[in-house]
Image (cartoon, rainbow, N blue to C red):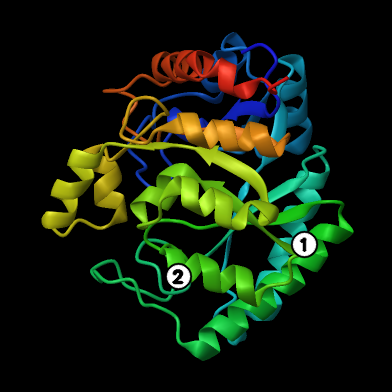
Amino acid sequence: MSNRLFKLGIHPINWVGEDVREHGDDTTFETIVDDIAALGLKGTEMGRKFPKDPAVLKRELESRGIQLVSQWKSVLFSDPAYRKQELEDYRRHAEFLAGFGSKIISTAEVGGSLHFDPRRTPNERVVLRLDDAGWESLAEGLNQAGEIATSYGMKLTYHHHGGTVVEQPAEIDRLMAMTDPSLVFLLYDTGHAYYGGSDPLELLRKHYDRIAYIHLKDIRHEILEQARLDGCDFVSCIRRGVFTVPGDGCIDFAPIIGELVERGYNGWAMLEGEQDPALHPAKVYAERAIEYLDRLEGLLKPQV
């Protein structure tokens, strides 16, 4: 897209599932980064098929002109017993990303969640919402992790996420209110906003001053509605095809993109689909998403 103000990248989760491991499990790292380069996109996140050796990964990305923008970091700050170890892990994570020139750490609390919390059993069905003590501990831990990120010239961007304790509008509001705005930023995700009950445009407007990173994801509303009626959890919703790329679902991205342009957002925004690539080929759907954003190009250009 010509004259794009923000930097458009793409997440490897379009090719290889993170929460649903069978999605794209036979896809290679080389296929992912070759496709990203062919799409003309210059930024991505760390994926589970990416080389763990920093030297190898740096060589492969640089040869294709791709920037490693971020990597997801799960944290368990709501339980004070885990704080020391979690902060040590966070520092190692920041050090790894800083070696690639990354400026963003995608961060999410896993305490109380169904498919992340290491203290829970696989047969549990309900997200355990935090009590006041859990919220206080989470906020303290995030502020401390934010200090670590800052020390490496990076920003902790909190990823509100389906199936976790920071998912719903009131939970996002509470997290923003309880954390230091100079240390804890927001990863604004259009798909997870809708999934969690937010109006994506309203969420963008409400917390824009905290947003340092964006995921552009769409929702198939009818599939989500049926999944909710059937009592599906977050991972089951992915398997059913609730999520897709921008332009293929129910979210109207025109006012969202227009808002970003009007406010002068110039950070990274990642295309995400998080669906089965055997049914929805990653490169094909990415091309469609880029074409959809191209049709919104008039909104992306500053008004004169």
Q: CA distance from mark 1 to mark 2?
A: 29 Å
Q: Residue at x 41, y 29 (%)?
A: 245
- 1 or 2: mark nearer the eye: 2
The N terminus - image quarter: top right
Compared with 102, 290 (above or below) is above
Of residues 227 and 293, the one drawn nearer to the viewer in this rendering = 293
The C terminus - image quarter: top right
**Position in image of residue 107 (x %, y %):** 61, 57
Element marked by disc 1: helix
Picture quarter containing residue 71?
top right
Q: Amino acid at mark 2?
A: Ala
Please identify the residue farthest to the bottom as the structure is shown: 133
Q: Is residue 117 visible?
A: no
Of residues 152 and 180, the one drawn nearer to the viewer in this rendering = 180
Residue placed under numbered mark 2 in the picture:
170
Compared with 69, 299 (above or below) is above
Compared with 40, 76 (above or below) is below
**Position in image of residue 5 (x %, y %):** 71, 25
Q: Amino acid at mark 1?
A: Arg
Of residues 207 and 212, the one drawn nearer to the viewer in this rendering = 207
Residue placed under numbered mark 1 in the picture:
91
Classify 10 Å Cα crowding around label 2: few (below 14), some (14-19), many (20 and above).
few
Element marked by disc 2: helix
Q: Is residue 193 visible?
A: yes
Compared with 240, 85 (above or below) is below
Sequence-earlier tag: 1 or 2:
1
Q: Residue at x 59, y 37 (%)?
A: 259
In the rendered view, does 16 fall on the left or right side of 238?
right
**Position in image of residue 255 (x %, y %):** 49, 34
